[in-house]
């Protein structure tokens, strides 16, 4: 049956449940968020969800207590960085960045969160950038507040699609949100259908135009198609969506936008919760992180030299392994930084030691630094933000201390 030009949204929704499924299936588990700011410097924030074990990702293999806590294999298999710390083999692809000064680590850091060890609370505090007593009252993210104090900052677009937003970027400042999934590569039939349904809608019409433009699909003149063809196109799109998009797809999309007007990108990677079989779990998670960083470097090209990547997690893990060859929720961990704008090739931080008396609550790596501090200094040097503004508005209550010299 031919499709009428007057096909309305009500009829379409009654007949075309496939569209709803398609749009629900298309977003990644976490969206990519972009913002456009003045200048040439770029910042990418990667939230590592699940609590990355910093003692495994960046191993203090020369600490005399490390072997007793983690075993000889862990101490032996790491890739030496500076004689004291070693990189997990799963991050071995980042060693060229370390040698070129484009990778750095800040160890024994945490958010102000203590003792609760809840992923939800820990991630909220990490993304709001405030102390636990303020987390319930402040519900916008520190990256959004940062955009709010940069003169001339604006969203790359006003369009958002995804299963949910990141608290990190939620707030008053305009931020574009997008999920670069295969399902957004619309066929001519699917594009024609969306155009017919949305073209006269004041709310969704322009947004859909931007969505199609962002997905780099530009097939004009698709012509009239029948309903069966359009529903088939939607089902094809849904099938493509089920494959999801990996960290390389996310990072390629981010790099493409950052080569253009965008200057800030944020996304998250899951899979760092390693209660059992940590070797297998962390190998996979670190490989995704490594892939994302290397894809960003390759995709950004010359712009990599003006880029800083911050990889942050909600908390570290226990110093000792548990009975299932995993680690439980802890306190301090490690923060990874990458990018051509770094003065890297260093592990920074005040190492607390791993003797039982040195551990936090005799179980966790003790925090000696605040994970917000390196982030604040990166924002100061990347975007010229006033220190007092960072301590007051972006990270309320933070004392930034001395400049750690992270930026080249």
Image (cartoon, helix red, strand yellow):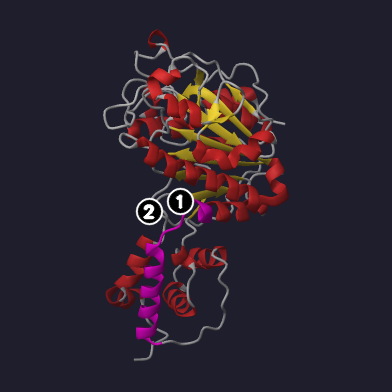
Mark 1 lies on residue: 31
Q: Is residue 274 left or right of residue 102?
A: left
Q: Nearer the viewer, residue 128 or 152?
A: 128
Q: Nearer the viewer, residue 62 or 363?
A: 62
- Rendered view: 275 above or below 4: above
Q: Quadrant of residue 305?
A: top right
Task: Give the residues in magenta.
Answer: 226-250
Q: Please name the residue shown 39% across and 28% down the image.
A: 135
Q: Please name the residue shown 30% across and 35% down the image.
A: 276
> Looking at the figure, which quarter contains the C terminus?
top right
Q: Please name the residue shown 45% across and 51% down the image.
A: 31
Q: Position of residue 131 (x, y in %)?
A: 42, 23
Contact check, label 2 and label 1, Cβ < 8 Å:
yes
Q: Residue furthest top?
A: 357
- Rendered view: 137 above or below 295: above
Q: Is residue 296 left or right of residue 239?
A: right
> Looking at the figure, which quarter contains the N terminus?
bottom left
Mark 2 lies on residue: 163
Q: Position of residue 247 (x, y in %)?
A: 49, 51
Q: How many marks?
A: 2
> Residue 18: in sight, yes or no?
yes
As measured in the structure, the alpha-carbon distance from the residue carrying label 2 to the one carrying label 1 is 8 Å
């Amino acid at each position: 049956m031919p499709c009428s030009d007057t096909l309305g949204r009500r009829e379409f929704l009654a007949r075309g449940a496939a569209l709803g499924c398609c749009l629900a299936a298309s977003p990644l588990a976490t969206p990519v968020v972009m913002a456009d700011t003045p200048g040439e410097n770029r910042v990418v924030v990667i939230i590592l969800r699940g609590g990355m074990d910093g003692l495994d990702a960046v191993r203090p293999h020369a600490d005399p207590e490390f072997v007793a806590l983690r075993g000889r294999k862990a101490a032996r298999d790491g890739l030496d960085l500076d004689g004291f710390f070693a990189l997990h083999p799963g991050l071995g692809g980042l060693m060229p960045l370390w040698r070129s000064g484009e990778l750095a680590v800040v160890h024994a850091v945490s958010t102000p969160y203590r003792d609760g060890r809840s992923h939800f609370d820990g991630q909220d505090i990490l993304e709001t950038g405030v102390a636990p007593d303020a987390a319930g009252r402040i519900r916008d993210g520190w990256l959004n507040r940062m955009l709010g104090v940069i003169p001339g900052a604006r969203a790359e677009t006003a369009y958002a699609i995804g299963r949910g937003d990141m608290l990190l970027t939620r707030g008053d400042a305009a931020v574009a949100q997008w999920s670069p999934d295969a399902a957004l590569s619309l066929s001519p039939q699917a594009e024609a259908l969306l155009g017919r349904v949305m073209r006269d809608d004041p709310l969704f019409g322009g947004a859909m135009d931007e969505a199609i433009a962002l997905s780099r699909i530009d097939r004009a003149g698709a012509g009239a198609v029948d309903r069966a063809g359009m529903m088939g196109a939607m089902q094809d799109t849904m099938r493509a969506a089920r494959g999801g998009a990996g960290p390389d797809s996310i990072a390629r999309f981010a790099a493409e936008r950052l080569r253009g007007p965008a200057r800030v990108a944020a996304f998250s990677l899951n899979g760092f919760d390693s209660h059992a079989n940590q070797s297998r779990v962390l190998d996979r998670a670190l490989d995704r992180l490594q892939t994302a960083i290397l894809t960003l470097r390759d995709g950004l090209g010359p712009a990599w030299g003006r880029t800083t990547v911050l990889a942050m997690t909600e908390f570290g893990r226990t110093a000792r392994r548990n009975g299932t060859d995993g680690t439980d929720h802890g306190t301090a961990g490690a923060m990874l930084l990458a990018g051509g704008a770094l003065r890297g090739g260093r592990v920074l931080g005040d190492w607390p030691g791993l003797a039982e008396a040195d551990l936090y609550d005799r179980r966790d790596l003790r925090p000696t630094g605040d994970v917000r501090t390196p982030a604040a200094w990166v924002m100061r040097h990347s975007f010229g933000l006033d220190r007092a503004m960072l301590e007051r508005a972006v990270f309320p209550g933070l004392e930034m201390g001395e400049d750690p010299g992270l930026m080249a």
